[in-house]
Image (cartoon, grey):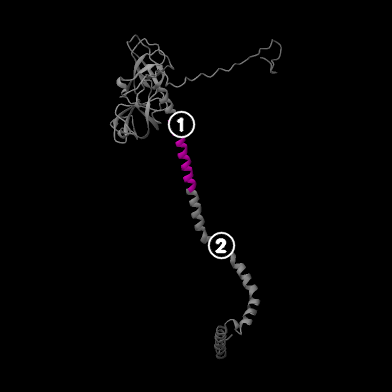
Amino acid sequence: MRDTRESRLLLVLLIAIAFALITVDIRGGEESPVDGARRAAATVFGPVQNSVAGAVDPVGNAIAAVRDSGDRHSRISALERENAALKAKLGSDDRNRSRVRQLDKMLKKAGAGQYAIKGAEVIAIGAAQGFSWTVTIDAGAGDGITRDMTVLNGDGLVGRVTTVGPTTSTVLLASDPGFTVGTRMEGNDELGFATGRGDRNLAVQMLNGKAKVKKGDRMVTFGSQADKPFVPGVPLGEVVRVDPSGGDLTRTVYVKPYVSFTQLDVVGVVVEAPRKDPRDKVLPEPTKPKPTPTVTVTVSPPGEAPADGYEQE
């Protein structure tokens, strides 16, 4: 349509008619005279609107999906956090089960030796009081711990208490070069003194230079006067090497300790010594050697094939 005077007048007329119809429709309410026309228009244009809506809905859904993707991402992140927490909990449970096993083993040792012990956890390692091989435990004076008490675990001798605080204590490990404990050999009761050598095996100076010692012999603590710092009968370790006596008054042997000093967790402080020396009762059961399998060899007479079908060379 050209922009002429007549077209402008027509446009103004149509706008006026539209406003008039809107006014009549509003004033008429539900009985509006144009209601029929509106229903007819809906009948004609409804299918077209549905088609357009059907074409537009996927786009709308996509927009909604983009809008909701943040919420889904948050839910996934929450699930990942829950899974991580669950794994951490399972790991913690595994550690707790390990501690229960350690504690059970230690209590059996204490029961065999009739030691009254206070269980504790190793909470720190290092040179707490100027010593090079020490650990800190979470038991102190408030738990009845005093200086020079024996410390053990489910495997054997750990060390002795050197410093006591209100809630913690320092334990000098048997592996420390400044550590010395009296020893007694299983069976023949030969006495000696064990000295720590860091991450190497303990060196035991036997008082009898002619003592019969062999690899695999086992030792326990001899004990101290008034049971401090050491109670008797705590497993120490097994002989792994014996130096020749050479006619000396003493003899040196090397003992692999039962305790792994780099893997300490649950320990027990002996707060009351046994009334009677347990001797060798606390030692672990000796490991039985595995039986050697018997091999049967069948030799066939000359000229005959072996039973397995192969010819002899």
Three-letter amino acid code at the position of disc 2: Ala
Q: Secondary structure at mark 1?
A: helix
Circle 1 is placed at which residue position? 101
Mark 1 Cα shell of 10 Å, populated few (<14), some (14-19), many (≥20)? some
Viewer-side residue, 163 vs 179: 163
Q: Quadrant of the N terminus?
A: bottom right
The x, y position of residue 92, in whole percent, is 45, 39
Looking at the image, the residue that sits furthest to the right is 304
The x, y position of residue 200, in whole percent, is 38, 24
* Residue 204, quarter of picture: top left
The x, y position of residue 232, in whole percent, is 36, 20
The x, y position of residue 267, in whole percent, is 38, 30
Q: Taking 78 as reference, is 116 above or below it?
A: above
Viewer-side residue, 297 vs 20: 20
Q: Magenta includes 83?
A: yes
Circle 2 is placed at which residue position? 62
Task: Residue 158: give its label.
Answer: none
> Gap between marks 1 and 2, in whole Å?
57 Å
Q: Which residues are magenta?
A: 82-103
Q: Which tag, 1 or 2, sits closer to the chain's start?
A: 2
The secondary structure making up most of the magenta span is: helix
Mark 2 Cα shell of 10 Å, populated few (<14), some (14-19), many (≥20)? few
